[in-house]
Amino acid sequence: MDLSHLAPKAQQVALLDDETRIAYCDMPVWIKTSGTKSFLDAVARMIELQRIGSRSCLGLIGVSGIGKTTMVERAEALFNTPEATRIVGIDLAPYGRHIDLQEIFLSQIGFKEKVKAMSNSNGVKRTKERLQQMQAAVCILDEANALAGVRSMLIQPNYTFLRGMANRDVGLSVIVVGTEELKTHLSVDPQCRSRFGLWEVPEWKADSEDFSRFLKAFVKFMPLRRVSVLHTREIQAYLANECNGSTREIVKVLIASAKLAIQSGEERIDKGLISLSRSMLLPTFGDD
């Protein structure tokens, strides 16, 4: 059986039974694109610049489901080691309207003291020493849209600490991750507006070469015994339009299509299976 169209691990799995292959389709897949490579290169530069005392601030902006969190997780996996935490990653989603950014940050790096006890020169010194011990260079705040919805009494302190993280006293580069709502929130504060450059993650388009490369790479990880050709203008247009340019939705459809291809014995994904999978994944509303 010729399985040369698959990645090495997927080739091995393609020889197994249907149940095992279907389960394998749900395994996480990392596809490197020009956009994700550029982002990881930017993080690498931030880490390198921190060693000479330079810092920068970046807003990673994109629609929900485009893959921002996956990019952040990849960066953490790539640059953090047991010996060094180059990236301090914080997910702000669980905190609701009660985000005290300084309190969350201090807790994340291991301090149990109240914010008030750390809000002095000695506290700042201890914070910097802890970050140096960790070899931390970058703080990434994921789901940072949450900053726009905090209680009014916390808005200004959070702006102040967000700016202060990149000052010499703390000394980190900062990446905040969110949607257009975060972009608007950053623009309200003049200093944040001037400090944070914007990195906007584009939605997938039917005529995108990067999208074509993404689809070619993705099917290599689905353990199908026949070749799937997804990088046609028709299929790219369908996926981009039906899934609103969202990586998350596109991946859901492709995984469902791969499972159907195994169950049906078709062993490849085509436009018909993609359309069927999309219709199965759409929410339905029955009469009460």
Image: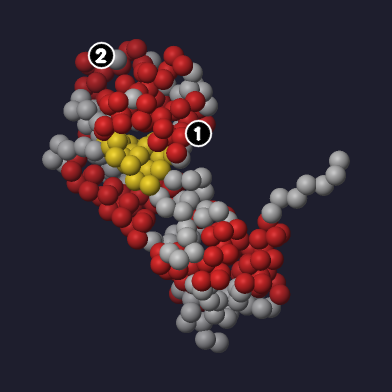
Report whether residue 267 is seen. yes
Q: Nearer the viewer, residue 2 or 194?
A: 194
Q: Quadrant of residue 14?
A: bottom right
Tell me which residue sits at (66%, 70%) in the image: 273
Disc 1 crowd rating (10 Å Cα; few below 14, some 14-19, many 20+) is: some
Q: Is residue 288 above or below residue 263?
A: above
Q: Which of 2 and 97 is in front in this view?
A: 97
Say left or right for 142 vs 137: right
Residue 103 shows which numbered tag?
none
Tell me which residue sits at (30%, 29%) in the image: 192
Of the residues tagged 1 and 2, which is closer to the observer?
A: 1
Please count the marks in the image: 2
Tell me which residue sits at (66%, 78%) in the image: 266
Quadrant including the N terminus: bottom right
Q: In this view, does 271 lie above or below 249?
A: below
Where does residue 178 sit, x and y in percent of width and height?
44, 39
Distance between mark 1 and mark 2 Cα atoms = 28 Å
Q: Mark 1 points at which residue?
A: 93
Say left or right for 110 vs 92: left
Q: Upstream in the sequence, badge 1 or badge 2?
A: 1
Cβ atoms under marks 1 and 2 closer than 8 Å: no
Quadrant including the C terminus: top right
Where does residue 3 sit, x and y in percent of width and height?
51, 82
Q: Quadrant of residue 15?
A: bottom right
Q: Which of 16 and 174 is in front in this view?
A: 174
Q: Which amino acid, by three-letter code, is at mark 1?
A: Ala
Q: Mark 2 points at which residue?
A: 120
Q: Which amino acid, by three-letter code, is at mark 2?
A: Asn
Q: In which quarter of the image is residue 254?
A: bottom right
